Amino acid sequence: MQQQFTQQKCVTLQKITDNKMKYEEIRCGKEVLKVPRAESYGDCIKLMRSDFYRYTGQKASFIKMLFSRHKTFRLNFWLRLSSYRGWAYYFTKYMLNRIRQHTNIDIIETTRIGFGFLLNHNMCIVINPTAVIGNNCNFSQFTTIGANCGNAAVIGNNVYIGPNVCTVENVSIGSNSTIGAGAVVIKDIPQNVTAAGVPAKVISNNMHSDFIQHPWNDICA
């Protein structure tokens, strides 16, 4: 059954199943994102493994990720585990909240986030829980994905967001795009471009794929 959000440019088209993991197809501008939904701890581990690969370029077991000393990945670890309301939910959410308070990174477990989520620096990031984030996205320090009313941004795959970027309300940022430092995004950004400024405008049709290091894909799984 299709569900449409009148206040958001994100439309949930349908839920699909792929390799026992469920996904939602969500419209982002002219494209459709395939966003995973964790419905078991196995799904959580698959998601956190993709995040760990983005940070290190290495595949890892659960034990290796559990004892990882990578400070920024620690938030990803507990964020992914708490995205499933299983028997350990309250403990994993408690651990997530502790790290959020320590780092001033405001992101909660219900936020829809794709594979390979990377935070460039372990400080001061705010993501509205209604935002949707695609696969292999990079977020830099002092970034705000916000909304005063209604829903927040829909961000495509392989998007790099620089420091001090702010997105306002339900804009969409197309896949393979780069948002330059200090930009304020108040209108949709198309795919495969670089945007910067206040308000953000397209300044180049060149992609910066080198900014997305160690991208996670089906070959890595």
Image (cartoon, helix red, strand yellow):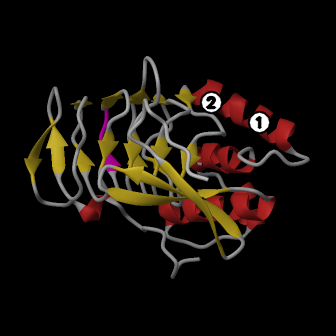
| Kind of residue at disc 2 | Arg
Image: 159 above or below 214: above
Which residue is at a point 56% across and 51% down the rendered structure image? 2
Q: Which residue is mark 2?
A: 100
State the CA–CA distance, disc 1 to disc 2: 10 Å
Residue 203 shown left or right of residue 194 in the figure = left
Q: Which mark is residue 175?
A: none
- How many dots with numbers? 2
Q: Residue at x 17, y 49 (%)?
A: 194
Percent x, y of residue 106 = 56, 28
- The disc, 1 or 2, on the residue closer to the chain's N-terminal end is 1
Residue 68, position in %: x, y?
67, 56
Q: Is residue 80 visible?
A: yes
Residue 84 within the segment the image draws in magenta: no
- Dot 2 lies on which element? helix
Mark 1 element type: helix
Answer left or right for 211 relative to 63. left
- Name the residue rendered at 61%, 53% in the picture: 1
Q: Residue furthest bottom?
A: 219
Vertical side of 178 occupied by 59: above or below: below
Majority SS type along the magenta span: loop
In the image, taking residue 55 as reference, residue 155 lies left or right, namely left
- Residue 145 percent across, percent down from the top left: 41, 31
- Determine which residue is flagged by label 1: 93
Check disc 1 and give the amino acid type. Lys
Q: Relative to 134, is 169 above or below? A: above
Is disc 1 surrounded by few (<14), some (14 to 19) or many (20+) residues within 10 Å?
A: many
Q: Would you say residue 161 sits in the magenta stretch? A: yes
State which region is magenta: 160-164
Residue located at (37% from left, 64% from top): 213
Residue lying at the far right of the rendered structure:
87
